[in-house]
Image: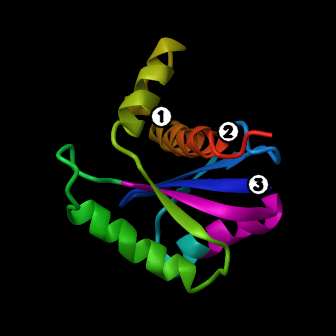
């Protein structure tokens, strides 16, 4: 069962997908935000192509754990997306996912400031991998 991971920002949406066994998250693409309906259409296209059965969205709590402006924006985005699909949508605390993505890119010699799209897609993969890892604790065969 393929899971879709999203890192929703104001300018871009990082997209990652899992393998069918739900063990590995891989960066997929970055959607440049234009208008909400087009953004959602782009996500629905990935859902259709990858046969996604579950969606995980990074929820940007503040460092203190409180819901701020960006978290409210993501909540509104989730509400809109859920009106276009019946696929279950879950949220995962995404604190530090972008920092981790930038760190990983630097380690392989990629400048994050020049590759924002790669940062966003990798952040989505980090968010999704976190979810897959926590979910696998409860699905041991």
Percent across and percent down for residue 114 are 43, 31
Point out residue 136 in the picture as x, y percentages from the top left corner: 66, 41
Residue 106 relative to residue 133: left or right: left
- Name the residue carrying label 3: 2
Mark 1 highlights which residue?
Answer: 115
Q: Is residue 99 left or right of residue 39?
A: left
Identify the residue at image location x=81%, y=63%.
Answer: 51
Q: Is residue 100 left or right of residue 21?
A: left
Q: Secondary structure at mark 3?
A: strand
Whichever of labels 1 and 2 marks the residue nearer the N terminus, that label is 2
Q: Earlier in the sequence, mark 3 or mark 2?
A: 3
Which residue does the numbered mark 2 point to in the structure image?
A: 26
**Residue 67 among those drawn in magenta:** no
Determine the secondary structure under disc 2: strand
The magenta segment? 41-59
- Nearest the viewer among 74 and 133 is 133
**Which numbered disc, 1 or 2, marks the residue closer to the eye?**
2
């Amino acid at each position: 069962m393929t899971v879709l991971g999203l890192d929703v920002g104001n300018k871009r949406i990082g997209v990652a997908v899992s393998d069918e066994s739900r063990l590995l998250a891989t960066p997929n693409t970055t959607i440049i935000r234009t208008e909400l309906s087009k953004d959602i259409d782009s996500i629905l296209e990935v859902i259709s192509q990858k046969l996604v059965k579950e969606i995980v969205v990074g929820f940007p709590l503040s460092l203190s754990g409180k819901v701020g402006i960006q978290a409210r924006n993501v909540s509104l985005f989730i509400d809109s997306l859920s009106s276009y699909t019946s696929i279950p949508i879950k949220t995962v605390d995404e604190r530090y996912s972008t920092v981790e993505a930038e760190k990983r890119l630097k380690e392989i010699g990629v400048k994050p400031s020049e590759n924002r799209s790669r940062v966003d897609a990798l952040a989505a993969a980090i968010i999704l991998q976190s979810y897959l890892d926590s979910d696998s604790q409860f699905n041991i065969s």
